[in-house]
Amino acid sequence: MILRLAIIGFGNVGQGFARMLLDKREWLLKTKGLDVEIVAISTRSRGSLISNRGLDIERVLDLLANGKSLDEYGDEATECTARQIIDRTIADMMIELTTLNIEDGQPATDHISHALSKGMDVVTANKGPIAFAYHDLRTTSRSMGSRFRFEGTVMDGTPIFSLIEKTLPGCEVIDIRGILNSTSNYVLTAMTNGRSMKDAVMEAQAKGIAEADPTLDLEGWDAAAKITALANVLMDARMTPRDVDRTGIKGITAETMNEAARQDNRIRLVASASRNNDDVVLRVKPESVSSKSPFWSVNGTSSAITIRTDLMGELTILETDPELTQTAYAVFSDMLHVVESIRSGTL
Amino acid sequence: MILRLAIIGFGNVGQGFARMLLDKREWLLKTKGLDVEIVAISTRSRGSLISNRGLDIERVLDLLANGKSLDEYGDEATECTARQIIDRTIADMMIELTTLNIEDGQPATDHISHALSKGMDVVTANKGPIAFAYHDLRTTSRSMGSRFRFEGTVMDGTPIFSLIEKTLPGCEVIDIRGILNSTSNYVLTAMTNGRSMKDAVMEAQAKGIAEADPTLDLEGWDAAAKITALANVLMDARMTPRDVDRTGIKGITAETMNEAARQDNRIRLVASASRNNDDVVLRVKPESVSSKSPFWSVNGTSSAITIRTDLMGELTILETDPELTQTAYAVFSDMLHVVESIRSGTL
């Protein structure tokens, strides 16, 4: 089986995913009978490519690694917009990897909706569309018979959506709690070790963990988008990040940390989704976490989710010190799940 | 689709599973189109039943809850052995729930092998067969086209085997570490809180956590069987619990605990499987666990596994305060996975 991909947004995650395809090329052929070709790439500032015969991934990665534009690739270079590329590509699957827009999840939502409505399968690591438009996108994908997956939107490649869907059949999710934002957690961990918030943020920026403008993280917007995505998918909520009762970590002082420590607690930014009669209540706020909690050991850029279900009680999954390659793996595993669905004729 | 079950061994887990079938009967019919019937039950000391028309589960559970033998059920009562029941039943699937035999995994292994070789699908929560004979059983199941699942053998219903199989495609397991035995962990937790080992064991027995003879747990045999099962399935090892470098917790004293506490550590019984060139090395021994470890918060009867893979780095899954119903859920989820395989025509 040949699988043709169009990749919209080709930053670190996209490039990591492309490298994974190269590394696992033989494994994919041998154990999955799968020949994956990239037939289109769209970037915001480094040019775009489209080719029905498949692109030379190594050459693409080399150009980008050397700071060059994809225009230098050759005749496959195109000035098409992402939407035009979706219209013109022969890809079976679109991989959407543009960056998060916390206002409304655009233009990623439009890209995905457009690709699904053309019958393409879609994989994304962008949480915006799941936080803002999951139910509409799911409706489109079901009506078109397209598959739509998004494991990389929460906790990198750690299976969360797949965990519930594929390993916990029949379980109903009662509530979810998570440490979901690595910048906030890195800053809080550093503050536990005596650093000021300002220093901790600068350190996180220097390490490439925090953005130049860390507001989305520190004010809890990133965590809010993630808990909304989780609730929309796993608890059938119909909410957006604006519906989250949200408090960031900006008000946390050394004193707050010390007071918590005196009670053998730590402060963590906890995002939660719980049921209240027929409603789902979403919350992001700093909480005291005791040494008996599985969240106690979630330090630095690590993250964790606790899920309570009716049949299986309380499970926690932790990801320790993730790297970018793990978000790339989310895309890789979603791609394989889609292939499996195609083969078994399910959605 | 009608699915007919024969249940060999019908203690707490089997009865919990049967109750779950009753509770989820409508859900199974409605969302899975699945009508599950129990057509045979074999117990060691409470009689056995066989009926092609399906047994009245509520009546069976009532008899057992009232301390009665299944002989009182009626004409369906039989004196057949488990093996004879497997020969005579029309069941599509055998559920093997007899108790662990740490010497050689029998008679469970024979039951499973026999059922698989007759073309029945098999689900078990008994770790013996996976620790002693996994590769033979897998060979039989593949050659017969039967499905064989065993999620309940390690960490109750927490997805471990399914986690790797279904949510981490393409990942190779590099090593595994786990707190797998609830009795040892309960005892060590109580000792951390100042209790003597003797008192802690008696407390665990009173609460029904530890057996009357807790030797298998305290000497690390139960953890050894579980890590062997994990290594056989997830790392393609061909080992038995006798191949485990095994140290139990019997030598742990209050002094050991205090010394660990002085270094801000706790003692936990850790089972591990790691690669050493082409070999897999299995170990069970008490280890110091620091407050930075995800194992720090694994108290009482909780358990945890950390899995390191090539593509997804280090993941930990924790189960907090499990109950018997969660092992029953393992059987339930395995049953659903088998049905899914049947429907998609995969093994």
Image: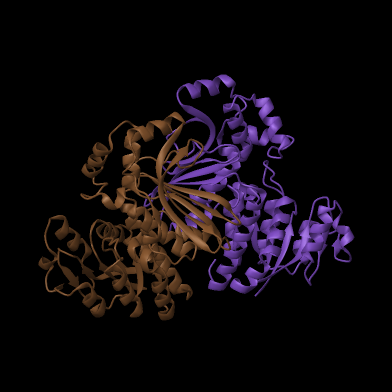
Chain colours: A brown, B purple
Q: Nearer the viewer, residue B281 or A338?
A: A338
Q: Quadrant of residue B342?
A: bottom right
Q: Is residue B248 visible?
A: no
Q: Nearer the viewer, residue A254 or B96?
A: A254
Q: Quadrant of residue B112?
A: bottom right
- Judge from the rendering whether residue A33 lies leftward or rightward of residue B132; answer left or right: left
- Judge from the rendering whether residue A56 lies leftward or rightward of residue A144; answer left or right: left
Q: Which quarter of the rendering shows the N terminus of chain A?
A: bottom left
Task: Identify the residue at horizontal 81%, vertical 56% (top origin).
Answer: B81
Q: Quadrant of residue B85?
A: bottom right
**Rendered view: B9 above or below B200:** below
Q: Is residue A297 visible?
A: yes
Q: Nearer the viewer, residue B248 or B321?
A: B321
Q: Nearer the viewer, residue A294 or B231?
A: A294
- Judge from the rendering whether residue A40 lies leftward or rightward of residue B76; answer left or right: left
Residue B39: horizontal and vertical position, in percent? 76, 66
Residue B16: horizontal and vertical position, in percent? 70, 55
Figure label count: 0
Task: Identify the residue at horizontal 40%, vertical 80% (top origin).
Answer: A144
Residue B141: horizontal and vertical position, in percent? 60, 62
Residue B113: horizontal and vertical position, in percent? 66, 57
Task: Identify the residue at horizontal 64%, vertical 50% (top origin).
Answer: B129
Task: Identify the residue at horizontal 38%, vertical 31% (top origin).
Answer: A258
